[in-house]
Image (cartoon, helix red, strand yellow):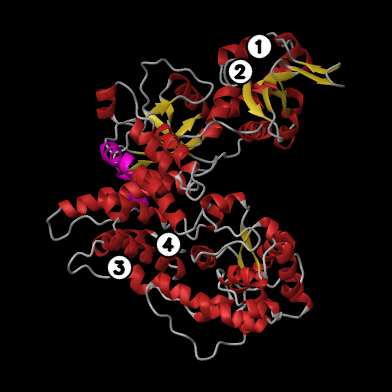
Amino acid sequence: MGFSTPQYLVSEYIKWTHNGTIQLPDFQRGYKWEDDRIRQLLITILRGHPMGIVMLLKTGNESVRFKPKPLEGTAPADEVEAQKLLLDGQQRLTSLSQALVGTGVVATKDSRGKLLDRRYYVHMETAIQGEDRVDEAVISVPADGVVRSNFGRTIELDLSTPELEREHGYFPLRLLYQPDEVMTWMFALGNIPLAQQFNKRVLGPVASYTIPAIELDQNTSKSAVATVFEKVNTGGMPLNVFELLTAMFAGDAAYYDRTGEDFRLSDDWHAAHQQFAAEPAIRGVSSTDFLQAITLVVTRAKNLADSSSRPPAISAKRDDILELQLDDYLIWRDKVRDAFLWVATFLADQHVFDARFLPYATQLVPLAVIRTILGTGTDLHSARQRITEWFWCGVLGELYGGATETRFARDVEQVPAWAQGDEGAAVPRTVSDASFQESRLYTLRTRGSAAYKGIYALLIGEGAKDWMFDQSFGKVQYTDLKTDIHHIFPYKWCIDNKIDPVLRESIVNKTALAATTNRTIGAAAPSKYLRVIEDRSKVDESELDALLRTHLVDPDALRADDFDAHFAHRKEAVLHLIENAMGKPLQREASVQEPARLADDFEEESADLELENAEDD
């Protein structure tokens, strides 16, 4: 990557933005500066203070073909081709290009977000008194030039005509870089000493004001451009790979030649996301997730097709996504979209019904890729069993919580062959790496933990039925019953009976219940609330005990209000459940430490616990 660092006059920037020499990449977000930020920018220039740099990318780069668009408020001729793309400095140059040209009206907003149109003036007498008075001298007024008060009934200042501007001594900043119009305006002022002083102290210095640029040449890579937006985009939010790829695809000449139009990645993604949004468990899948999945499929195909000793790696890192070609995207888009929809069904089969209880959103990316690779083969009994085992190893082993790109690639490389039972296929690292410690049950307290949400789903999947309605928690019933996770021994009862809070809040003491059932339980002792449930539901003791056992709960311990016996019984049952899901025995600990010593971060989770407990009791 080569670059230069020229200094350009403000007047040059304004000329270039209006004639189309400088334009924006199509992915740049819209202009959004507030009125006071514009006023402060003008004050900075009038004082002669530096306003920072802008970053430009020369066009003609074959690997970075962004579709250009004019800055807001400019209207270059259609046939004009941009020579430089503005990568950083959009808000500043757009402000200057609107405020210092033509009518000087800027479409902006106030500090509360209310849209308004403003013009900017500098009070001449005040400005010539020195740099420290410039802030006071520069004002913002409504687009019609009239400042009103008393709900619009009183005119405080009227600058609606050049004559009134001169009468009140306010120079319109729209003329700042238009010397012929400045001369005409000043000549009519009728105050030669003021005009001379203002020209010497304000207009002269401003005419030579420059803004430094970093100008990237035609050899700049996509990765370097992405880094620019992540590191130095000072005017707004850094752009993500989806927005960068949107612009690159829009500039794809081959697609335009075939179809006569630009490809709109944002529209394409919107159509897919609408389908995902209809499935509560996957509605959080993002555009970047979607691109990562496609990139994994594409890089895997290239890896398999390359017979060299060093084939390209399977990967979905930022640089790999930016290298994605539009034709490759179009080949795999529909298959990957359908795979994510299959993921929603797979999650429902695991009794994960909504995003709140989705253990890892990140794990959905390789899961969708595995489906894309194997197709309907994922639904064959043996393959489905192994994919399910891999899924739970990732969840209960808590392996998808950190940096995930390497694990993505490894799972995409290893899981398909293993799931199909291919001869010589090794056990995937996610399966072999996964482990679960018995003591972890004491620290799983809120749905901020993937394993907590996973165990909750496994308990539902064991055939748990609601205690009042005798309904299994299928996808429809789960929603209809307003199901959530609640204490078995109620929160208030535990406090009154001095139950260790670590045990009280453990997943071991929580289960899925309908909202109505939870309200019926309230804060009562189990021995009492069970009788209430029996009375209201018209069931006998043995029938309710059978329902309790579907939650791996010991009815005798509940009816005796014996928390310790309840906890010991259910902990062992949950450990067996985890073993079955992960397909491997867990190493039991000879003696678990005192629970309180396992909860060093208990206070850090207090806010989440308070929220869940408020919903519970």
Q: Which mark is nearer the camera, 2 or 4?
A: 4
Nearest the viewer among 124 and 343 is 343
Q: Is residue 110 visible?
A: yes
Q: Are marks 1 and 2 in contact (CB under 8 Å)?
A: yes
Q: Quadrant of the C terminus?
A: bottom right
Q: Position of residue 260 (x, y in %)?
A: 30, 21
Q: Residues under labels 1 and 2: Cα distance?
A: 9 Å
For the magenta stretch, what is the residue range? 318-335
Q: Which mark is nearer the camera, 3 or 2?
A: 3
- What's the residue at 32%, 52% (across, down)? 371
Q: Which residue is mark 1?
A: 185
Q: At numbered mark 3, what does the secondary structure look like: helix, strand or loop?
A: loop
Please give the label number shown on residue 175.
2
Name the dominant secondary structure of the magenta segment.
helix
Three-letter code for the amino acid on which mark 4 is drawn: Ala
Residue that protrudes farthest toward the bottom in the picture: 590
Q: Are marks 4 and 1 in contact (CB under 8 Å)?
A: no
Q: Is residue 164 left or right of residue 239?
A: right
Q: At numbered mark 4, what does the secondary structure look like: helix, strand or loop?
A: loop
Q: Is residue 22 left or right of residue 115?
A: left
Q: Which residue is mark 3?
A: 428
Q: Position of residue 272 (x, y in %)?
A: 42, 38
Crowding at dot 3, Cα within 10 Å, few <14 / some 14-19 / many 20+, comes out as some
Question: Any magenta on residue 320?
Answer: yes
Three-letter code for the amino acid on which mark 1 is drawn: Trp
- Looking at the image, is mark 3 or mark 2 earlier in the sequence? 2
